[in-house]
Image (cartoon, helix red, strand yellow):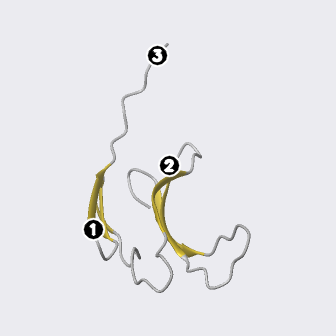
Amino acid sequence: MTDIGKLKLEHVYETVGNHFLQPSKSRVTLYPDDGQRITLFEGQPLFQEKFPVVKDLVIDGGVVRFEDGARAYSVRIEKLPARVE
């Protein structure tokens, strides 16, 4: 849990059609306090490839950092002030 909500790193299998030898996906999801679900990253290796696979998340305040084996990501997340409409 952070000041921006809950972050979750998952390695999931999702299949559509033939699932033979389909690798898992890496998914980084933000669950803010307002109940939303926001996917920040989702990557799936091609057959017999080793990346993209996210192994660790580093959270520093509102900045989330991670690598997928091919690229490094840095995502800044900030709450906006409440708006009156």
Left or right of 36, for residue 72: left
| Residue type, mark 2 in image | Pro
Q: Which residue was labeled with disc 3?
A: 84
Check the picture and name the quadrant holding the N terminus.
Answer: bottom left
Total marks placed = 3
Percent from the top left, x then y, of residue 30?
Answer: 48, 55
Mark 1 to mark 3 CA distance (whole Å)? 39 Å
* Residue 61 in sight from this viewpoint: no
Q: Nearer the viewer, residue 42 or 30?
A: 42
Q: Which residue was labeled with disc 1?
A: 71
Q: Which residue was labeled with disc 2?
A: 32
Percent from the top left, x then y, of residue 23?
Answer: 55, 80
Q: Residue furthest right?
A: 17
Mark nearest the camera among 1 and 2 is: 1
Asked which secondary structure carries label 3, the reply is: loop
Up-down relation of residue 63 to residue 70 (above or below): above
Mark 3 to mark 2 CA distance (whole Å)? 20 Å
- Which residue occupies 49% across, 13% down? 85
| Residue type, mark 3 in image | Val
* Residue 70 in sight from this viewpoint: yes
Up-down relation of residue 27 to residue 69 (above or below): above
Mark 1 to mark 2 CA distance (whole Å)? 25 Å
* Crowd rating for badge 1 (residues with CA inside 10 Å; few <14, some 14–19, many 20+): few
Mark nearest the camera among 1 and 3 is: 1
- Which residue occupies 36% across, 76% down? 56
| Residue type, mark 1 in image | Arg
Q: Nearer the viewer, residue 59 or 49?
A: 49
